[in-house]
Amino acid sequence: MRIRATVAAATVSGALALTAFAVPAAQAGTAAAPDLHKPTAAERFAAHDSTARKSTFAAADEPVVSNVTVNSGQDVVLGTTNLKTFTVSLTASHASGIQDAYIDLWHGSDLDHVDGYLPPNEDAATCTASSDTTSTCKLTITVDPQSDLYNALAGSWHVTAAALAGDGSIYENDYYATRSVKRYSKLTTNASPEPVTKGKTITVTGALTRANWDTFKYAGYTNQPVKLQFKKKGSTTYSTVKTVTSSSTGGLKTTVTAASDGYWRYSFAGTSTTPAVTSTSDFVDVQ
């Protein structure tokens, strides 16, 4: 059984405190999901004694949060072995200034049914002030596909955004945005024979595969539409010749008539769980 790390918060003044504890994850290939604890705002932000900070502001209005960014606005894509670390950030404003922020990603139908959780690496955000009231705060998140993910988690994740003002007031939204976490995809192309006589048949084969987070191997992505594209020698653009459906093993195979020298490639548009991918092209000399 794989072990999934999650966090509970400790009360440490002036910082976000996160302490890891282990929760058993679903066994590979099963539909069962772990019951993960996702911290509340009170747990995320440690208790703060406003009198100790000599603040002249009364805790009232929440901070205003904007520009929440995850992985530079790109989907989070992982293969089977390599860890991925990406930056998350937000901008927050409050009359008393901003002292901390928090962003995480979580997967589940609601907060009572969380089956995937990706917390930040740092105990506290690095906040850079652009004025007395506004700061941009950054954190990083690291994902290990072999301990944090399994196939059922591919797709849309919720993004939590939270900010802590200088007077202790807190903004928190567990449903601030969504971001896709996807299974890395690969695509190959081989056109033959090379060279080929004009008017003869070219056979174009390939394979569409993607990361399997249950087995930690790559497997064929079946029954997917993949475009066969051609770029004539001397041209700068590809045109779609036909669409081929991947087989039960992810295999691709079709034939075309040799007309002119050029480059052949397969291109996959992607799905909600798997990113788009285009193969390296294969040049065919037509004689």
Image: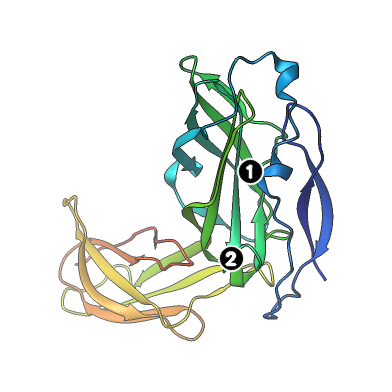
- Give 122 or 240, whichever is nearer the viewer: 122
Q: Is residue 192 left or right of residue 216?
A: left
- The quadrant the N terminus occupies is bottom right
* Amino acid type, label 2: Asp
* Residue at x-position 81% and y-position 37%: 11
Q: Is residue 111 visible?
A: yes
Q: Is residue 184 visible?
A: no
Query: What is the secondary structure assignment of the residue under circle 1?
Result: strand
Q: Is residue 132 left or right of residue 232?
A: right
Please tell me whether mark 2 or mark 1 is closer to you in this view. Answer: 2
The alpha-carbon separation of the residues under discs 2 and 1 comes to 21 Å
Judging by the rendered image, the residue that carries numbered circle 2 is: 110
Q: Position of residue 65 (x, y in %)?
A: 47, 36
Judging by the rendered image, the residue that carries numbered circle 1 is: 141
* Amino acid type, label 1: Ile
Q: Position of residue 285 (x, y in %)?
A: 25, 63
Count of picture labels = 2
